[in-house]
Amino acid sequence: QVQLVESGGGLVQSGGSLRLSCAASGFTLDHYSIGWFRQVPGKEREGVSCISNLGRYSNYEGSVKGRFTISRDSARNMVYLEMNDLNSEDSAVYYCAAGPDQIVSGKAVCDMSPSEYEYWGQGTRVTVSS
């Protein structure tokens, strides 16, 4: 059974930090690009960050660059999203998802479009209080 489970969300004050975890069962995360997405009520799900299957390529949405870091732990079959200097705009339900790498100019890259991802977790809520 293929399953992704997010954890690590919660309530944090503005300027604080959280680390989200994405755990997989039934498949190996290293074989996939992994993306982190977030969604607030009334808005479309947006890509926050992604990492290619070997971890050689990563990408970030503009507002989180320099504050968020995505990483893999192959031994644990986990992917993390370290989030620092959080603000109220970061409040959302965060999802991790797995999908195939995209090949651009012979290099494996990840895509931050939700439509490119096959497997999704149930989400973890992040609330940043001002």
Image (spheres, rainbow, N blue to C red):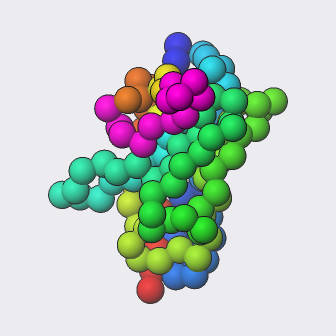
Taking the spot 40% from the left edge, 49% from the top edge, the residue there is 47
The answer to whether residue 73 is magenta is no
Quadrant in which the C terminus is drawn: bottom left
Residue 17 is situated, as x and y percent measured from the top left of the image, at: 63, 70
**Residue 115 x/y as whole percent:** 32, 32
Please tell me whether residue 31 is drawn above or below residue 65 in the rendered image: above
* Residue appearing at x 59%, y 28% in the figure: 107
Q: Which residues are magenta?
A: 103-115
Of all residues shown, which one is farthest toward the bottom?
A: 130
Left or right: residue 51 versus residue 128 is right
Res. 101 visible in picture: no
Residue 52 location (% of width, % of height): 60, 34
Name, please, the residue furthest toward the front: 105
The residue depicted at 60 percent of the width and 68 percent of the height is: 66
In the rendered structure, the answer to whether residue 71 lies left or right of residue 124 reads right
Residue 30 percent coordinates (x, y) = 67, 25
